[in-house]
Amino acid sequence: MTAIVEARGAAAIAPQAGAVKLTMLLAGAVILLMMIFGLTMRAAQGGLIELDPTLFYQIMTAHGAGMVGAAGLTGATILWYFTGRYVELLAGVYWAFLGLFLLGVVLILGATFIGGYAGAWTFLFPLPAISGGLWTPGAAIVFLLGYVSIGVGFLLLHLEVGRKLIAAYGGIGGALAWPVAFGNGRPEDAAPPAVVAAMASTIFNTLGIVVGAAVLVASIVNLAFPAFTVDALLAKNMIFFFGHVFINASIYMAVIAVYEIVPEYTGKPWKTTRMFAIAWTVVLLFVLAVYPHHLMQDWAMPGWAVVMGQVVSYFSAIPLIAVTAFSLLVYLRGAKSMRWDLASALLVLGVAGWTAGSVPAVLDGMIVVNKVMHNTQWVPGHFHTYLLLGEVAMAFGFMAWLGRRGDDSLSGLPGASFWTYAAGGTGFVAMFLISGAMSIPRRWAVHLPQWHLQAQIASAFAALIILAAAAFVLRYVVRLGKS
Amino acid sequence: MQTTILALSFFLMAVIAWAFISAARAAGSGSVATNTESRRKWLIVGLAVVGVVVTALSLRPWPLAVAATSAVVNVSGAQWYWEIDKDKVPLGQPVAFNIHTIDVNHGFGVMDESGRLLFQVQAMPGYVNQVEYTFNTPGAYHVVCLEFCGVGHHDMATDFTVASK
Ligand code: HEM
Ligand SMILES: [Cu+2]
Ligand SMILES: [Cu+2]
């Protein structure tokens, strides 16, 4: 334990920095490509380009799976990198994770663009098997096997992280800082913030992926042997449990970068407090309990479950607003010095975007609102806010930090690209929210002429985002090349 | 409803953005805030109280209730069309819609003439989902699909009429 605490002082430890840098390069490339796919879709919705609906839905499937995958990949990489400061992790596990991830990407892209699979990243049962003649069961199986491959990689990574943290911090409770949260342990002896976050997200992501694996296997068997069917409501519950947990885990893992990197800019450590420890345990429970907010229009769901979805959605915002965001604000104001560069600016933007995105999400998590907002563009409106301006901003911040130099600042090109990203992202998500409030459905390849203007404006904002993101990635490549 | 939600959302998001921008500007000033933890406590208590009140108000009456009614409309979704067993729906009384699907999940969404979404419910294999609505304006209503169901998803639309008394 003391060895671990001492290791924290030596923040220079860079576990498997090479593998991590390579991953972030790959992730940056995937995100850029998927953003171009996104712009293609938005331009088609605005009538700016002609896109066959079949191709639109293939692109939508690839964009959804690719972006969620990239978010998970960057989140898990951040988790791995910083956990490695506290415990020694097996390098081989990371390479297996990365290899399985890339295999998954190949299978998913192949299934989509060669096999024609266009059943969306959510593979809602029984759509993969009932394509209306558009893709074969084989293509759907390959797509789902891609998920299985990625899922196995995540399980390996989480098992390694979880097992090492449990051993080093005296059990799950120790790693979650329960002595401080619920006992009279001293904060000085508590597990550091990165460890608490890593332990909590490892637990919920593992549970999410296990449930995801079960419904994936059931769907694959159904595709191979159509006589085997699954209850549609059960499958929906499992898919949304998995999807919700996985995407949330990516954000909760990415925020570790804030805890670990921002202190380098202020000279002030980020400490585990009682409030912090309690918040993470609450988050752990809430992330697992909130998913029925996706099923509010499934009338067959038990009433108590959708009420739980509504209540937990709202109360999930409290640890985010009153602990994560509030603490960062207090921390920044209280810091004696602060240096802004691309990395620190993007990391703070990430927490801001995440927090802001919780507002339309929580509103949509109310049954009465959901009745008129569910599956309109309100939904991509809120999740692009906490992903594009949240998780992905943090991931780009981590990338910028990996390629940092001592004298970086926010003037010149980095500053211009940062503000372009923030402004483009804000405009882009605002157009989704406005479109949702105007009842424009999500996931429609063809939009009515009276909806074209919103999509056209959004396309312009999307182009700005892509320019900025390209600048982030290019700068990273140049920095890597020089080091 | 939608406009109010949009305005409220933008307002709260702007407040959050403002809080971040002003903290970022103040960063590095080393200002010592003394009552941080008590402010945090009030924030938590405030959010919790608002949460309890809003939850209670928004769930009564139960938004998903469907009463026994004489006006029943059966709707069936399929790739990629809707079938509705009545083309005239009564005005000014609760109408219960029974939603079936013969293949994959669909979403039964009803819009008024201006294109504003009034209500929706999912259609799910093996289940009959119900939704109740009282139409107060006669005229044409537009049915769209609000659950992705394959390549014809956006084309899966139909209309029905609410008859004047
Ligand atoms: C330039 C940036 C981006 C653009 C232009 C863009 C555009 C789009 C568009 C047009 C849609 C379909 C909207 C609809 O349902 O009508 C969409 C869906 C989606 N986007 Fe993005 N997006 C961008 C960035 C991101 C990022 C950064 C993420 C996550 C990390 C993301 C994740 C998703 C997901 C999960 C979907 C849902 C796909 C589905 O409905 O099956 N997007 N995006
Ligand atoms: Cu969710
Ligand atoms: Cu549909």
Image (cartoon, rainbow, N blue to C red):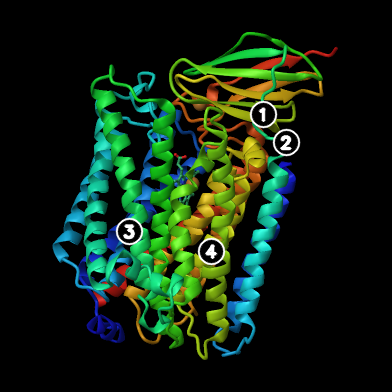
Separation of marks 2 and 4 at Cα, in angstroms: 29 Å
Q: Is residue A407 left or right of residue A109?
A: right
Q: Is residue A361 visible?
A: no
Rendered residue at 22%/67% (across/down): A164
Q: Give the residue displayed 37% in from the left and 61% down from the top.
A: A200
Q: Nearer the viewer, residue B131 or A263?
A: B131
Q: Residue at x 35, y 23 (%)?
A: A134
Q: Are marks 4 and 3 in contact (CB under 8 Å)?
A: no
Disc 2 and disc 4 on one polypeptide chain: no
Residue located 50% across and 69% down the image? A418
The residue pinned by badge 1 equals B65
* Residue position for label 4: A319
Q: Secondary structure at mark 4?
A: helix
Gap in angstroms between the C-alphas marked 4 and 1: 32 Å
Give x and y (percent) for residue A169: 28, 72
Q: Secondary structure at mark 1?
A: loop
Label 1 near label 4: C-beta < 8 Å?
A: no
Q: Are marks 2 and 1 in contact (CB under 8 Å)?
A: yes
What label does residue A202 carry, if any?
Answer: 3
Looking at the rendered structure, which numbered label has been put on residue A121?
A: none
Q: Secondary structure at mark 2?
A: loop
In the image shown, does A217 or A470 lie closer to the viewer?
A217
Dot 3: what SS?
Answer: helix
Q: CA distance from mark 3 to mark 1?
A: 39 Å
User: Which tag is nearer the camera, tag 2 or tag 4?
Assistant: 2
The x, y position of residue A163, in whole percent, is: 22, 63
Q: Residues within 10 Å of mark 3 (few under 14, many from 20)?
A: many
Amino acid carrying label 3: it is Thr
What is the distance, in whole Å, between disc 4 and disc 3 at their CAs? Answer: 18 Å
